[in-house]
Image (cartoon, helix red, strand yellow):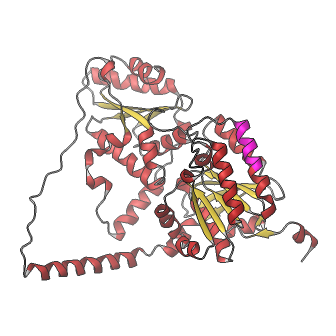
Amino acid sequence: MSEKNEFAAKITSGLDVVDRAWGGLFKGGSYLVYGRVSNGRGLLALAFEQAGVALGERAMFVSSAREKDLQIQSTAIGFNVISANENSLFRHVRTRDLAPSNPESASARIEHLTELILDFRPARLVVNDLVSLINVGTELSLGEFRNHFVELLERIEPIETTAVFTLPEPGNDSARKLAEFIMSRCAGAIHVGARERDSEGYKLTLLPQLGHVTRRTVVSWPLHDVVSRFEDVEGSYRALMQQRHAALAQLENRSDSAVVEREPSREPTSHREPPMSETTDTVQASTLDDLATGLGLGEAFPTSLTLEEAQSRRQVRRDAPRRSPTDFQNRARFAESLKGQFSQLATGGAPFLLVAMRVDPTREPVRPFDFEFLSGVVLETLRSADDAFVDLQKERLVLLFPGSNADDSQEFFSRVRSRLREDAPQQAAHLLNLVSAIVVPNGNPFSSADAFLNYVLDAN
C-alpha cells in the first residue's frame, strides 16, 4: 500500500458513480448531502450505510422516521435493516427519543446522541435531516449550533466514524448559511438534483472541500435502475391475487353453513365549504389535512392499479415541468393576473378560486426548511393555467385557480396531501398541520384584488 493511501484511507460510498469520481470517501471524514427529499436524498444515505453493513461494519442511522417507515424505505434498495439490526450491525436512533428528560434542549439532544455514538462505535453514521435534530421547539442561533456541531465532530474523531449529514434544499439566507457552515467542516458535499430529462438518472453534483482535489463534478445516478432491481411489482401482484382467491374460497366454504349478512351500502357524504360572509372577520382558516378530508377513504386508500396504469401515472409525473418557489416571487405580476380575474368575473366571465396559506406556529413547531419544502410540493401539484405567489420571508403562499369553484378545492387539497405522503411520509403529518389555509371562491368577500392580497399577505 502506498504512503498516500496509508495516510488517507478511503471507503466505498455505496454509489458507483461517486466512487468513480472521488475514489471513495475518506475514512473518518464528514460529508454533507442536501437536496429535496423526493429526489432520493434519504436513499443515498441508506446506500452509504448498506455498503458498510455488507462489509461487516457497524452503521447508525439517526432520523425522525418511524421504524416501519425506515424498513419500507430501505427495502427499495434491497437493504434489510431488520436483519442488520439483529446482527448488531445497524442501529436506528429516532430524534424524538433523544434526551427524554430535556426534549426541548438542542444541546441535550446532541450530547445524548454523542454518547450513543461513542457507545455503539459505528464505522458509518448518518444524521438524516439534521434540522430534525437541532429544531426541537426552542430557538438555536447559528453560533450555538456551530459550537455543538464542532464538538460532536471532535468527540467522535477518535473512533474514525465516517459521517454523512443530510439537509433539505436551502430556501432562504439562514438555511444557506447553515448549509455553508456544515459544508466548510466537511471533506465534501453532494447535491442531489432533480431527475434528468429523458433519463432515469438523478443529477448529483459533487462539491469537493477537504482532500478531494477534483473540481466540481456532475454525474448521473441511476436510482430508478437500483430500485427496480428490488421492486418485484409483478411478483407482489401475483401474491396478492393468490391471497384474494384463497380468502374468497374460504368465504364460499363458510357460506354453506352460515348466511353472511351485509350492511346496506352507504353513499359517501360530500363536504361543502360554508358560504363566505360579507366581512373578512369570518374567513375561517383550517389545516391542510382538514381541507383534504372531503373525498373520504377513497383518496387515502386508492384502489388497485394495473401495471400499465401505474406506469402511465409515473410517466405523466416524470414529464411534468418542475416548479419551485423562486419562480413565483413577483407580487406585482401576480396582482395584475388576479385583477384580470376580478374584472372578467364582473362582466360575466368564468369563476375563479383563491387559496391562501400561511405558517401557523401555534399549531406545530416551525423548522427552517418546512415552508420551502411544503410550498415546493404545493406548486408541483398545480395545473399549467394556475398561478401563485410565494413570500418566503413571511412564509405565505397564495394560489389562483382560473375556472374553478369552491368544490374543486377539495380535490386540490387531496392532491397535496397525497403528494406529501408520497414524497415525505415521515414529515407529512407535521406539514399538513403546520399551515393554515383559507378558501376564497370568486374573491368573495373581498371587493378587489388589492384588498385580498393586503389581507392574506400583509395582515398579521
Is 156 positioned to the left or the right of 128 in the image?
right
Q: Per the image, is 454 magenta? A: no
Residue, far front: 101
Residue lying at 91% horizontally and 69% vertically, measured from the top left: 4
Q: Position of residue 125 (x, y in %)?
A: 68, 61
Decide which of 383, 355 is in the foreground and name it.
Answer: 355
The quadrant of the image that shows the N terminus is bottom right
Q: Is residue 216 visible?
A: no
Q: Is residue 206 above or below residue 361?
A: below
Residue lying at 30% horizontally and 35% vertically, measured from the top left: 403
Q: Is residue 46 above or below residue 272?
A: below
| Residue stretch rendered in magenta on the structure | 142-151
Q: Is residue 155 visible?
A: yes
Residue lying at 51% horizontally and 34% vertically, measured from the top left: 328
Q: Position of residue 156 (x, y in %)?
A: 76, 58
Q: Quadrant of residue 437?
A: top left
Is 343 positioned to the left or the right of 397 in the image?
left
Q: Position of residue 248 (x, y in %)?
A: 19, 78
Q: Is residue 361 above or below residue 100?
A: above
